[in-house]
Image (cartoon, rainbow, N blue to C red):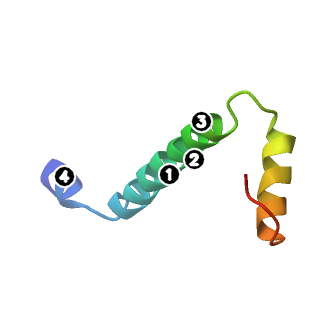
Amino acid sequence: MFKSFLKDESGAQVVEYALIIAVISIALVIALQVLTTGTSFSSFISRVATCLGGTSCS
């Protein structure tokens, strides 16, 4: 019974996907903190909207 439990891989994919999502989430949080250093999040979103609108992206 124990050997069959060790060989069972039915939940392995779920764990792998959860780890991938966790790593991507952590990377996004770190990237947003770096991009918004010294500014508020709403001003960051305004800058992104300005750049996507086709005006200056400075």
Q: Earlier in the sequence, mark 1 or mark 4?
A: 4
Mark 3: secondary structure: helix
| Residue 28 badge | 2
Q: Earlier in the sequence, mark 2 or mark 4?
A: 4
Residue 6 % position (x, y): 19, 52
Q: Nearer the viewer, mark 2 or mark 4?
A: 2
Hey, which residue is sitting farthest bottom in the picture? Answer: 54
| Residue 24 badge | 1
Mark 1–mark 2 distance (CA, rounded to whole Å): 6 Å
Q: Nearer the viewer, mark 3 or mark 4?
A: 3
Q: Residue at x 44, y 59 (%)?
A: 17
Q: Is residue 54 left or right of residue 28?
A: right
Q: Earlier in the sequence, mark 3 or mark 1?
A: 1
Can you identify the residue that label 4 sits on? 6
Q: Amino acid at mark 1?
A: Ile
Q: Residue at x 57, y 43 (%)?
A: 31
Q: Amino acid at mark 3?
A: Val
Q: Nearer the viewer, mark 3 or mark 1?
A: 3
Q: Earlier in the sequence, mark 3 or mark 2?
A: 2
Q: Quadrant of residue 43?
A: top right
Q: Nearer the viewer, mark 3 or mark 2?
A: 3
Can you identify the residue that label 3 sits on? 34
